[in-house]
Amino acid sequence: MDDFEVLIVGQGVAGTMLAHELDRSKVNYKVIDKGHHTSCTAAAAGIMNPLTGRRFTIASGFSRLKQKALQSYRILEEELQVKLVYPLPLENLFYDEEQKSRWLKKRDDPHFMSFLGNMDNVSYTEHLVYPDCIFSDLITESLAIDLKTLITSFRKKLFKEKRLIQENFNVNELIYRSKGFEWNGLRFEKIVFCQGSALLDNPIFKSSLIKPSKGQALIGRFTGELPQRIIKGKVFIVPYPSLNAHWVGSWNQWQYSGNQPEDRGVEIILKKLAETLDMEFKIIETVAGVR
């Protein structure tokens, strides 16, 4: 019987980054993941934005977390020989005077200012047409992570190193031992569940504390040229360099049936896109995920 220190259940972002850290710590582990196309990672844009919400709150510990994230992702880029990190400024669009005034007051805070570009009283719209937008400002400390490339590239690494078990995990098949666990003839000291919304079906956890939501986004190409930055208006528009395309989204639902993309979601996203940017957009793929 083979013995391992850790079993990771799920290879989304959490499972992948945990496996990466275990690699660096020389811990013997296995990852079990069937490869679900409707995981939240499949539909995520991978944005890291320091300023969030209607009150433009600075994310707690953002600078420290960003530094740690960049350190890890740069190592992964070298190990996997792929491009993952895209430092991209984020252009924030404003549609009413109250929202604009609240933002400008925030600009008086030196700490808040440290995340922004130099404002010269003009919009950053350049040649772009932003319907109903009265003002825009640039957040310079944002970035995007190509999560799809991360997951697929790391999965190939796991497969090559014979660390990946491509099966569905049934917690009822888990055997508790005096020290550790046994599952399908393998023994582990510890198990870490990185299942995302699938924890709803895991009896170890209280499902009443888990509130899944479904997100939907579009991947496609614009007919005109866009600057290399994230645009945050009625929707997010995010460069997707590995596909020479853009990610546009999202449409989120707390109440939903099924985990597949819906025509209604496409209509809503396209409507919000038209209210954000006046440029023709051709859809390549519609993605959805539950988190």
Image (cartoon, grey):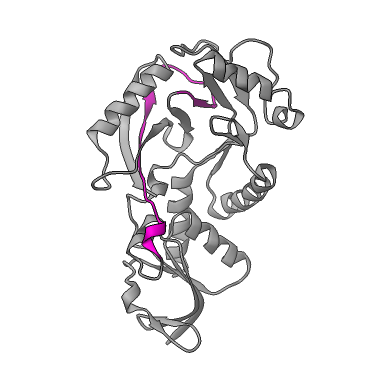
**Does residue 142 lie above or below 211 as drawn?**
above
Based on the picture, tell me whether residue 134 belongs to the magenta stretch: no
Residue farthest right in this picture:
110
Kindly identify the residue that appears in the image at 57 percent across and 49 percent down: 77
Residue 223, visible in the rendered structure: no
Quarter in which the N terminus is drawn:
bottom left
Q: Nearer the viewer, residue 31 or 97?
A: 97
* Residue 16, x across and y down, in percent: 49, 58
**Does residue 193 lie above or below 4 as drawn?**
above
Horizontal side of residue 133 vs 112, given as left or right:
left
**Does residue 162 lie above or below 88 as drawn?**
below
Q: Nearer the viewer, residue 141 or 209?
A: 209
* Residue 213, x across and y down, in percent: 36, 46
Horizontal side of residue 14 vs 116, given as left or right:
left
Quadrant of residue 223 within the rendered picture: top left
Kindly identify the residue that appears in the image at 35 percent across and 69 percent down: 203
Residue farthest bottom in this picture:
178
* Residue 259, x across and y down, in percent: 28, 47
Task: Point out the stretch of residues depicted in magenta.
Answer: 206-233
Residue 137, visible in the rendered structure: yes
**Does residue 100 lie above or below 27 as drawn?**
above
